[in-house]
Image (cartoon, grey):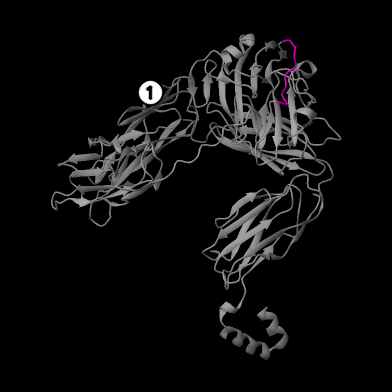
Amino acid sequence: MKIPKCIQLFGVIGLVCLVTLAMVSAAAADPNVCRDLPASANPGDTITVKLDITLDGADKTVIEDNVPAGWVVSNPSDGGFVVDDNTVGWTNSGAAPGDNQFTYDVTIPGDAAPGTYDFDGVFDLNVAAPGLQAIDCETQMDVEAAQNGGEPNVCRDLPATANPGDTITVKLDITLDGADKTVIEDNVPAGWVVSNPSDGGFVVDDNTVGWTNSGAAPGDNQFTYDVTIPGAAAPGTYDFDGVFDLNVAAPGLQAIDCETQMDVEAAQNGGEPNVCRDLPATANPGDTITVKLDITLDGADKTVIEDNVPAGWVVSNPSDGGFVVDDNTVGWTNSGAAPGDNQFTYDVTIPGDAAPGTYDFDGVFDLNVAAPGLQPIDCETQMDVEAAQNGGEPNVCRDLPATANPGDTITVKLDITLDGADKTVLEDNVPAGWVVSNPSDGGFVVDDNTVGWTNSGAAPGDNQFTYDVTIPGDAALGTYDFDGVFDLNVAAPGLQPIDCETQMEVVEEPVEPPEEPEGIVIEEGWNFISVPYYLNNSTVEFVLADINYSTIMYYNASYDNCSGMWEIPTTLDPLCGYWIESDETEDQVITLDVLEPMVPTVPPTKTLCAGWNAIGYSDAMTTLPAELALSSIDESYTTIKGPYDPANMTYEQIGHNGETGVIAGNHVGTDIFEVSPFDGFWVYLTQEDTLVG
């Protein structure tokens, strides 16, 4: 029923129709969902689907829409959810949709054939008249071959210039026409560090990123990655080089074209390194602020920076490897290199009883070996502390978790309104049998059930106190009460109850997931696996007979006198690491009965080349540290990476030969790096050697 058409066709009669319709109850109309699609798109494109919703008469929400097989949905709006790669949904049995248009994105596979593709979906928006109806309006769209001359290509897009210490984004624009596989590797200048490759790419080493899929074209028409330029990089022109192979029928590596060079320019700041402090204009007592130190790197070749905050304020969280000298001072020191970034930061907590007024910061720096000498950090040196405007009454508000399990230790937060506070009396009580611990800010444990804070001469020194509570392992399920009191004002004494949240639920602990099945688990996405011994039947066809997978490949480092090549294996052999990609959302298992060992056999050996090698581990029963598992190549390797986590697309550990213990983050010594059965690993050698199983 379209009123404008009625007016156009019938003139004055249409106006009468319009007035009549306005008098009819709105509830007479039916709710509806109407799909709006682009007319056409190309393989590899990501499109947005719009669902226009007629809300008249709607009082619940059930919408599910399906895209063509192999297309991938994402980003449903308005609280929607992804059911699987092909389906999105919205559900609320108690309310109509909150908007008159929902949207979601769909990525078309890079190898999608030209043609017409169907969408189908259903909706139910009315409690009184239930029943699924088809989403109407547009149900089809065309995929057209990209008009690009018929040859796949990769074209690099670089910034024209950047400064030392900058992080830039490199774009690889991909011509998908004719593409049916993915081999892309790009190299940045020596000493620059790559990160964050998009679309399932991986970091080969600090200077190299890659994307590989022998069975499919790239899934997007642009890949990206980030590169960090060293802070000490000299001005000049730097080269990028890389290769690609996107066509099975015409294999061969071709050079990534378009832009191959970019300039690094000294920052335009007069030739002198400098440090400039950036402060908030104002803050309140009890606030935690972030101080920024903007660094001019031009001419810098060492790092000495120290900054001091007002007395009684407390520094924390210095960035970029900085350190806390004492409560009032942070520092950064490296006598051999310029700062690695053009901004350092740190946090400062202002005491809760800080008086309103102007406070001073002072600090010094020395960034140049040839012209040593401490110079004052300039720009902003003062900031104002203002009394918080919050209605004039001190208060304490308890913040509890909604639920916890028997045996858990939780943290209780007491949020404090400091306005008008000039003394501290707080006491909080937990349920009987629960045990308090770790009160912050000078608090004390009264007994197992009670914590307190007391200072008759000053307001609380922070706007939040915390303490921990351990719930007994045998606590019954149910609702538990907290109660406590406070008095924060000398002029108006009297204990008041701590307000806000006074109850929390103890709920049943979730059931532990079942133990992983024995064998090699294949998760969704890329998996890096190995077999621990020669198999009785090692053919890929036999071993993977029950596994749904899209790609399997192996990096043969010894190919063509150690020039290296990705290959499609026909057998699975020990001491080799294999990459296998699964599109299944559920885990699959290569069971032990398939992995029957060959008997008798001799222990395996494998020739490894200088550079990166994909290896496996030849012990099915025992996990060993790399120091022992790789003892046969101890004089030749420097680094080992693995196992690979398909869910997070990261390596769990990076082991450094000759180092011990935890180094930083996931970097560890090979004395604690665990080499485990069924996993694949990357190992970097400085010379050719033989790995013995």
Predominant SS along the magenta part:
loop
Task: Quadrant for the N terminus, please.
Answer: bottom right
Q: In the image, residue 658 lies at what x, y percent?
A: 54, 12
Mark 1 is surrounded, within 10 Å at the Cα level, by few (under 14), some (14 to 19) or many (20 or more) other residues, namely few
Q: Quadrant of residue 316?
A: top left
Q: Is residue 304 left or right of residue 569?
A: left
Q: Secondary structure at mark 1?
A: loop
Q: Is residue 113 left or right of residue 492?
A: right
Q: In the image, residue 209 lies at what x, y percent?
A: 66, 31
Task: Quadrant for the C terminus, please.
Answer: top right
Q: Nearer the viewer, residue 493 or 459?
A: 493
Q: Nearer the viewer, residue 666 or 383?
A: 666
Q: Quadrant of residue 119?
A: bottom right
Q: Amino acid at mark 1?
A: Gly
Residue at position x 78%, y 28% in the image: 542
Q: Is residue 597 left or right of residue 97?
A: right
Residue at position x 56%, y 81% in the image: 25
Which region is colored magenta? 593-602
Residue farthest toward the right in the current orientation of the protein? 249
Q: Is residue 626 magenta?
A: no
Q: Is residue 477 left or right of residue 678?
A: left
Residue at position x 66%, y 42% in the image: 585
* Residue designated by label 1: 373
Q: In the image, residue 452 lies at what x, y percent?
A: 22, 40
Residue at position x 34%, y 47% in the image: 399
Q: In the image, residue 559 lies at what x, y percent?
A: 78, 19
